[in-house]
Image (cartoon, rainbow, N blue to C red):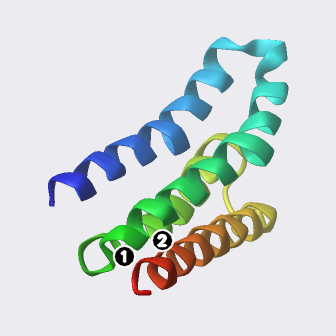
Amino acid sequence: MKKLTIWLILTIILMIIVPLFAVIFAESAGMMISIMLFFVVNPLFSALGGIVAGTDVKSLWMVPLATAMLFVLGAWLFFGMGETIFVIYGGVYLAIGLVTMLLVLKRTNR
């Protein structure tokens, strides 16, 4: 439970608080920060979350799902409610997390 709580807090920070600060404080660099988040940081975090979830699937199975859902929520709050492209990005992050979780699970069950 402690590990899940830590990962949910990290996910909230990365998927909601960081974009909020980018929108508020970065002004003209906010778009560059958002692009870096969308294409570099968020996919890596999704993969890392999948790796962690793969080590203990029974209690951490929701980490990839929470990552994708909180991304969509944060993107809709700060960039436009109902934009379908963010749902697609969230689906890709979910897929990355699930694939890495399954790869780790397969590797540890050998």
Camera-nearest residue between 14 and 75: 14
- The three-letter code of the residue at mark 2 reads Leu
In the rendering, which numbered label is found on residue 65? Answer: 2
Horizontal side, residue 57 vs residue 42: left or right: left
Count of numbered circles in the view: 2
- The three-letter code of the residue at mark 1 reads Trp
- Extreme residue toward the front, this view: 110
Using a 10 Å C-alpha cutoff, classify the residue at mark 1 as few (fewer than 14 neighbours), some (14 to 19) or many (20 or more).
many
Q: Which residue is at a point 59% across and 59% down the rendered structure image?
A: 47
Q: Quadrant of the N terminus?
A: bottom left
Residue 75 appears at what percent x and percent y?
A: 65, 49
Q: Quadrant of the C terminus?
A: bottom left
| Residue that label 1 marks | 61
Q: Which residue is at a point 64% across and 12% down the rendered structure image?
A: 25
Horizontal side, residue 61 vs residue 69: left or right: left
Q: Which residue is at a point 45% across and 80% down the rendered structure image?
A: 105
| SS at badge 2 | helix
Residue 96 appears at what percent x and percent y?
A: 66, 68
In the rendering, which numbered label is found on residue 40? Answer: none
17 is higher (above) or lower (below) than 92: above
Q: Are marks 1 and 2 in contact (CB under 8 Å)?
A: yes
Camera-nearest residue between 27 and 52: 52
49 is higher (above) or lower (below) than 24: below
Camera-nearest residue between 63 and 81: 63
Residue 90 appears at what percent x and percent y?
A: 66, 65
Using a 10 Å C-alpha cutoff, classify the residue at mark 2 as few (fewer than 14 neighbours), some (14 to 19) or many (20 or more).
many
